[in-house]
Image: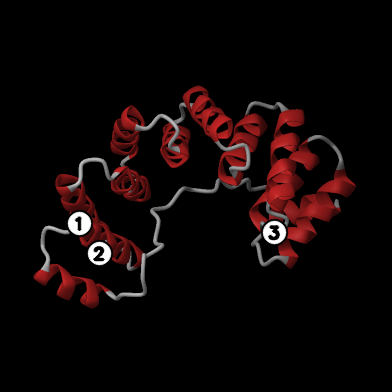
Amino acid sequence: MTVNSDNQIPKTDLLDGDTIEDIERKLAQNPDSANLHYNLGLALVRSKDWDRATAEFRSAMKLKPGMLEARVNIAGILLQKGDYDGCIEESLKALEFRPDLVEACINIGIAFSHKGGLDQAQKSFEKALTIDPKSVVALLNLGNIYLSWGNLEKAIEHNFRAIQLKPEFGMAHNNLAVSYFQNHEIEKAKIHAHKAISLGYDVHPEFLKQLEN
């Protein structure tokens, strides 16, 4: 059976609908605009040009040191590239300036999860939930941690809360199904596994076979 984590990814919400070429033209006329460098970084993230995006976010921070969104996005890029230590370092720097940055806490938690540091990951996700009790990403990842520790009650609780907040989230239904299965609540597991499938989530075939046996 497969339990999945919801990875934090760099933001791609451009302030307007400009293409990369549009923003580059604007930058040529106004090279000292931190916002334009930031927007170009977002556009490059959307095309998964990680290195150029990182360079643009760093340019934005150089021009506007308080632009923590740029640092958070750099951390997200490092997470995508598998540089977990770099992700943690950038996220901690962001938290030095703003301890209530949920995205930074989540990035740290995911990075520690990949490194096998589940105790540190749990603390980061719990901090994220303290800041934003409706963070579905934090709830889902905490559910996975508790499941790996065999704390099925907590795993079910967190995955169920994630579904309450985002009912059409296939991954959360899949993970809740796995949690119920481990807790020998087979009928509930079947309900959520099939709900995940109906939402287009790719439930592992071996898990489905186990549910039917």
Query: Residue 79 falls in which quadrant of the image?
Result: top left
For marks 2 and 3, the one nearer the N-term is: 2
> Circle 3 is placed at which residue position?
205
Residue at (46% x, 48% y) in the render: 8
| Callout 1 crowding tier (Cα within 10 Å): few <14, some 14–19, many ≥20 | many
Which residue is label 1 attached to?
A: 56
User: How is the structure coloured here?
Assistant: secondary structure
SS state under label 2? helix
Q: Which mark is residue 111?
A: none
Q: Earlier in the sequence, mark 1 or mark 3?
A: 1
Nearest to N terminus: mark 1 or mark 2: 2
Tell me, yes or no, if residue 178 can be seen here: no
Residue depicted at x 86% and y 40%: 185
Residue at the image position 68 percent from the left and 53 percent from the top: 166
From the top left corner, tell me how far across and down residue 201 is, in percent.
65, 62
Q: Left or right: where does residue 181 sit relative to residue 200?
A: right
Disc 2 marks which amino acid? Leu
Q: Amino acid at mark 1?
A: Glu
**Which residue is rendered at x = 35% and y = 38% of the image?**
84
State the residue in front, 172 or 181: 172
Q: In the rendering, which numbered label is found on residue 40? A: 2
Q: Are marks 1 and 2 in contact (CB under 8 Å)?
A: yes
Q: How packed is label 2: few (under 14 Cα within 10 Å), some, or many (20 or more)? A: many
Q: Position of residue 146 (x, y in %)?
A: 65, 30
Mark 1 and mark 3: span between their CA atoms? 42 Å
Number of labels in the image equals 3
Residue 19 in the image: above or below residue 39: below
Disc 3 element: helix
Single out the mark in the foreground, 2 or 3.
2
